[in-house]
Image: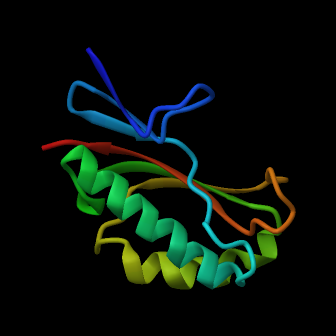
Amino acid sequence: MIKRLGPGKRLSQASIHGNTVYLAGQVPDEYSGDVKTQTKQVLDKIDALLKEAGTDKNNILSATVWLPDINDRDAMNTIWDAWVPAVGPARACVESKLADPAIKVEIAVIAAIP
């Protein structure tokens, strides 16, 4: 059985199958901030979705980070490193155009549900 969180016609914010939750790519609610501000907003959204799924960031198996400007990686990593547990998950960080030019970061994660 698959459980959906924040279901919609085009996508769900998360899908749960068994003991694994798959989050859709999360973007900030406010596009006006710099990459650090936007990363903080995205990580707060991820925390909330993981909590709703019955897990937390300590159980993240993998993360994918998209940046429209790879030169923002160090700034994004400053916020990521303060947020992620001592042992980080598998992660990819790639440069890619995003849905809106004002979006400076998008992050998707997969996490185990204990």
The residue lying at 62 percent from left, 59 percent from top is: 27
Q: Residue 22's quadrant in the figure?
A: top left
Tell me where residue 52 appears, x and y as whole percent: 26, 50
Using residue 100 as the reference point, say whether residue 4 is left or right of it: left
Using residue 93 as the reference point, say whether residue 89 is left or right of it: left
The residue lying at 58 percent from left, 48 percent from top is: 25
Using residue 1 as the reference point, say whether residue 14 is left or right of it: right
Residue placed most toward the observer, 14 or 105:
14
Give the answer, above or below, for where 112 lies relative to 82: above
Give the quadrant of the C terminus: top left
The residue lying at 66 percent from left, 73 percent from top is: 30
The extreme top residue here reads: 1
Count of marks, rendered view: 0
Tell me where residue 82 appears, x and y as whole percent: 41, 83
Give the quadrant of the N terminus: top left
Q: How is the image coloured?
A: rainbow
The extreme front residue here reads: 8
The residue lying at 49 percent from left, 75 percent from top is: 80
Tell me where residue 26 appears, x and y as whole percent: 56, 54
Q: Residue 33's quadrant in the figure?
A: bottom right
